[in-house]
Image (cartoon, rainbow, N blue to C red):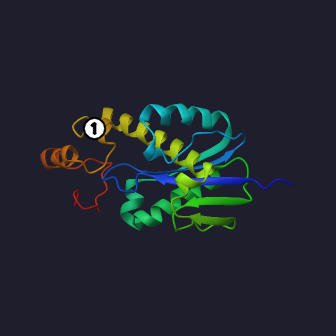
């Protein structure tokens, strides 16, 4: 019997605004060319995201900026991962997690440092999580046009920090983060 392996990764940990997003992916077919989402162009990420979704069982989990402020970014990232795994329609036998920390679930897990570049399941999770969060930040840009979320996706660029100085913070900012406080 083949074991069901899921990969999980999160994006948005270092951003000053918006949620942290995790994706869990169980690939049904092998997809060649996958890599850490940060090593792919936006066009390639978008292409692979559609391909991954067509060839996998996947789910997302998130933790809001309020949860991040209340329980810290590490715990919020683990919460988002836990939610993504629990949202899967298929229960995995093994979860490969990018990094050194694992969410608290009664499922066999293996933490792999740099896993998003080493394991296709984690690469797939990295890619769809990044595309999902980037698209979400583009949507937030429509509600909060003074911050440039469409461009920097909530990360602490000079443009973003300058916009906070000029406009103050908005409801999706992480109040506990340096540069926002």
Farthest-out residue, right: 1
Residue at x 37% of width, y 35% of height: 138
Quadrant position of the N terminus in the picture: bottom right
Under circle 1, the secondary element is: loop
| Depth order, front residue of 169/43 | 43
Where is residue 61? Give x, y as percent. Answer: 54, 51
When the figure is inspected, residue 162 is found, relative to residue 45, above or below; the finding is below
Where is residue 74? Give x, y as percent. Answer: 44, 65
At label 1, counting other C-alpha atoms closer than 10 Å, the crowd grade (few under 14, some 14-19, many 20 or more) is some
| Depth order, front residue of 140/107 | 107
Quadrant position of the C terminus in the picture: bottom left
Farthest-out residue, left: 166
Residue at x 55% of width, y 57% of height: 115
- Number of numbered discs present? 1
Residue at x 32% of width, y 35% of height: 150
Image quadrant in which you'd find residue 85: bottom right
Where is residue 64? Give x, y as percent. Answer: 42, 53
Residue at x 82% of width, y 53% of height: 2
Where is residue 103? Give x, y as percent. Answer: 57, 65
When the figure is inspected, residue 55 is found, relative to residue 62, above or below; the finding is above
The residue indicated by pointer 1 is 144
Relative side of 32 to 5, left or right: left
Relative side of 102 to 15, left or right: right
When the figure is inspected, residue 59 is found, relative to residue 44, above or below; the finding is below
């Amino acid at each position: 019997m083949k074991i069901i392996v899921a990969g999980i990764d999160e994006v948005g940990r270092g951003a000053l605004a918006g949620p942290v997003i995790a994706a869990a992916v169980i690939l049904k077919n092998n997809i060649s060319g996958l890599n850490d989402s940060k090593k792919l162009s936006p066009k390639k990420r978008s292409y692979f995201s559609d391909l991954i979704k067509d060839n996998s069982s996947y789910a997302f989990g998130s933790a809001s900026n309020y949860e991040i402020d209340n329980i810290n970014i590490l715990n919020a990232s683990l919460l988002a991962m836990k939610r993504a795994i629990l949202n899967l329609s298929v229960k995995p036998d093994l979860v490969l997690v990018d990094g050194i920390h694992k969410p608290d679930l009664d499922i066999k897990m293996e933490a792999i440092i740099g896993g998003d570049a080493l394991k296709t399941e984690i690469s797939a999770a990295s890619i769809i999580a990044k595309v999902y969060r980037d698209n979400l930040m583009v949507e937030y840009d429509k509600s909060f046009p003074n911050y440039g979320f469409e461009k920097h996706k909530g990360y602490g660029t000079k443009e973003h920090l300058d916009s906070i100085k000029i406009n103050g913070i908005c409801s999706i900012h992480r109040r506990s983060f340096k540069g926002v406080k």
